[in-house]
Image: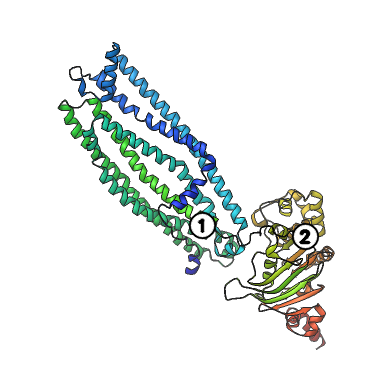
């Protein structure tokens, strides 16, 4: 299973910061630039408001709790300014009244800070949700346009991770990253300015621990970056493994692989746990380390500032303001490292998201592509060679033509390339050599919408969506009304069992059609195809899972419905195609025989051998009875 596990591996990540990716991310902000500008203005305002508290504390202590009448120059700068203004205006303020006024200013600043931060957070969360909506919409639209070859090589779980976890990581960038970083930087600059204004010597003492914080943050960033990448890789593996094994749970239980599957999942899950534990280890060191270093900074302020107060060179209010500002200064520094992690996560996710969005649309419609609302149904394969893997051709120089209204069947051993013909006709893949034409026009020149609207296909493995029976027949096409639904269901003999359902066409269909028999799901698929009234009908092993009685009923309906339509019938059971206008026999990727049922039997070639293998029991029965 080692090779299978490799399928779940994520690609490694690139730079911690990529200007090209950031420019693409910013384009998603442009439609909401007014909201972003408003959030930035609110952050500037909140940064200014957060400077008020410590200054109010200094004023209260210096002017009203411990006034410095003898040495007013010792007071903090803001206290000296207020005191001089009061003296100049001849205003005397009682200590109790002054304290009440300062407390009111402090309270108002806190309330305003709360309101501003609430509004800023609400706006940024709104922007983040809208950007997530835009991103998920773009990714899902792009997935619809990608060729099937892309899904052949990419696990579904990995793609689900793109739409869910990776987009969530970008949401954090927009809600708690870009604008919040601006707020942290503004707050730091404001605090630095105020500290130097209060006392430049004590400010330098406050900043002496910054080299230690920088070294600790650098160590954390280097370790956390690698750890975060590893966690994302392991998470993607879990998603991919779960999707595959939950979808294939019937096979797991049928072959009693529950224990083995559980052990494999436990191994992947344990790798994810260990990666998270390593990440937790770095966080467990970093944040206590930041607390320790900031405590050292506070201690230095108390030691030096306290000495200055005792010497009469600094006021108590200034010292207390310094302590409050220092704590508010160190916290944004620690937050900036967290913002770095958010940035790292966003870069990793955006690298993968834009890598998906940059996937080439090999199956896109050409500019000014051909379209025809009245398709005749002529199909031609002209010297077609095709391979899924380079150097391993599945079809080799295949050429045949189907006239409008003709029914052509394709038979051959498993792996002969029968279903590939249908995929090429629908342009799920493009040929390497030759051409596939509809009404004389290369399918690569058709508009995909017009081409595929002209063709309906019923597969052996029917896929039904969760919803109702009517939803699965109509598939969102409003032009298919209730009368047409009933007509299509009646023509394929599905109306009887649908009417017997408790809610009829409104009966709920569970995921993947759970609760319906294989035959019922195929009848719904037949009704779906016929409701769209295609000019070309492809039946790929469409009756292989239906009992003989139901098959006979469907065959009679198909014979009537195939009139006027071009039909390509791919089958293993030769009994279903004996009335075809022509039968093509594929063998090892080449067209070896073609003709009617009787003509091919008369040739006694590959078709004759296939016929004998399927009917040897019936053919030998008369001989055994005779003996």
Crowdedness of circle 1 by 10 Å Cα count: few (<14), some, many (20+)?
A: few
**Element on which disc 2 rests:** loop
Q: Relative to the observer, which residue lies in front, 153 or 249?
A: 153
- Rendered position, 28 above or below 490: above
Report the quarter where the C terminus lies: bottom right
> How are the residues colored?
rainbow
**Element on which disc 1 rests:** helix
Q: Relative to the observer, which residue lies in front, 117 or 614?
A: 117
Q: Relative to the observer, which residue lies in front, 80 or 134?
A: 80
Identify the residue at horizontal 39%, vertical 45% (top origin): 339
Q: Which mark is residue 534?
A: 2
- Nearer the camera: disc 1 or disc 2: 1
In the image, farthest residue toward the bottom? 627
- The percent coordinates of residue 131 (x first, y second) are 53, 44
In the image, farthest residue toward the left? 311
In the image, farthest residue toward the front? 368
- Of pointers 1 and 2, the one earlier in the residue sequence: 1
* Separation of residues labelled 1 and 2 (CA atoms): 36 Å
Identify the residue at horizontal 51%, vertical 57% (top origin): 355
Let me know if residue 256 appears in the view: yes
- The percent coordinates of residue 239 (x first, y second) are 51, 57
Q: Which residue is mark 1?
A: 355
- The percent coordinates of residue 250 (x first, y second) are 60, 62
Q: Is residue 531 left or right of residue 59?
A: right
Q: Is residue 601 left or right of residue 24?
A: right
- The percent coordinates of residue 93 (x first, y second) are 29, 13
- Rendered position, 191 above or below 25: above
Identify the residue at horizontal 22%, vertical 20% (top origin): 66
């Amino acid at each position: 299973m080692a090779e299978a596990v490799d399928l779940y591996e994520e690609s490694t990540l690139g730079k911690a910061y990529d200007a090209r990716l950031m420019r693409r991310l910013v384009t998603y902000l442009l439609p909401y630039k007014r909201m972003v500008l408003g959030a930035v203005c609110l952050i500037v305002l909140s940064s200014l408001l957060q400077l008020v508290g410590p200054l109010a504390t200094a004023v209260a202590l210096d002017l009203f709790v411990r006034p410095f009448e003898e040495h007013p120059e010792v007071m903090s700068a803001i206290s000296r300014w207020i005191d001089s203004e009061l003296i100049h205006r001849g205003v005397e303020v009682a200590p109790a009244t002054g304290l009440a006024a300062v407390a009111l200013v402090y309270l108002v600043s806190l309330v305003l800070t709360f309101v501003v931060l609430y509004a800023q957070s609400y706006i940024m969360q709104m922007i983040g949700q809208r950007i997530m909506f835009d991103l998920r919409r773009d990714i899902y639209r792009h997935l619809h346009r990608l060729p099937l070859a892309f899904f052949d090589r990419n696990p579904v779980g990995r793609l689900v991770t793109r739409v869910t976890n990776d987009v969530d990581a970008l949401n954090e960038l927009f809600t708690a990253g870009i604008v919040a970083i601006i707020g942290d930087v503004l707050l730091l600059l404001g605090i630095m300015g105020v500290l130097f204004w209060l006392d430049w010597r004590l400010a330098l003492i406050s900043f002496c621990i910054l080299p230690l914080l920088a070294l600790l943050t650098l160590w954390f960033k280097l370790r956390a970056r690698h750890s975060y990448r590893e966690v994302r890789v392991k998470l993607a593996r879990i998603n991919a493994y779960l999707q595959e094994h939950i979808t294939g749970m019937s096979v797991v239980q049928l072959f009693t692989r529950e224990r083995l599957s559980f052990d494999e999942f436990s191994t992947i899950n344990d790798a994810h746990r260990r990666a998270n534990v390593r990440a937790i280890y770095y966080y467990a060191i970093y944040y206590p380390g930041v607390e320790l270093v900031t405590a050292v900074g506070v201690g230095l302020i108390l030691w030096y500032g306290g000495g200055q107060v005792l010497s009469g060179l600094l006021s108590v209010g200034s010292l207390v303001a310094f302590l409050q500002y220092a704590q508010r200064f160190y916290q944004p520094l620690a937050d900036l490292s967290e913002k770095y992690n958010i940035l790292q996560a966003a870069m990793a996710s955006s690298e993968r998201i834009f890598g998906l969005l940059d996937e080439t649309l090999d199956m896109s419609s050409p500019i000014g592509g051909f379209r025809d609302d009245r398709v005749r149904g002529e199909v031609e394969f002209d010297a077609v060679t095709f391979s899924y893997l380079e150097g391993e051709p599945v079809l080799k120089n295949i050429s045949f033509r189907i006239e409008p209204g003709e029914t052509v069947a394709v038979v051959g051993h498993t792996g002969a390339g029968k279903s590939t013909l249908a995929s090429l006709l629908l342009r799920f893949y493009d040929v390497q050599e030759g051409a596939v034409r509809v009404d004389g026009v290369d399918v690569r020149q058709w508009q995909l919408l017009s081409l595929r609207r002209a063709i309906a296909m019923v597969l052996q493995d029917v896929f039904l969506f969760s919803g109702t029976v009517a939803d699965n027949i109509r598939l969102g096409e409003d032009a298919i009304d209730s009368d047409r639904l009933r007509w299509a269901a009646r023509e394929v003999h599905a109306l009887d069992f649908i009417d017997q359902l408790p809610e009829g066409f409104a009966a709920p269909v569970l995921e993947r059609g759970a609760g319906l028999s294989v035959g019922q799901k195929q009848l719904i698929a037949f009704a779906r195809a016929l409701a769209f009234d295609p000019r070309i009908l492809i039946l790929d092993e469409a009756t292989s899972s239906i009992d003989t009685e139901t098959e006979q009923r469907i065959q009679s309906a198909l014979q009537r419905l195939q009139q006027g339509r071009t039909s390509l019938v791919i089958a293993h059971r030769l009994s279903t195609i004996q009335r075809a206008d022509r039968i093509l026999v594929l063998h090892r990727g080449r067209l070896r025989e073609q003709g009617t049922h009787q003509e091919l039997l008369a040739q006694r070639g590959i078709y004759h051998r296939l016929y004998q293998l399927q009917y040897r029991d019936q053919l030998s029965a008369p001989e055994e009875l005779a003996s």
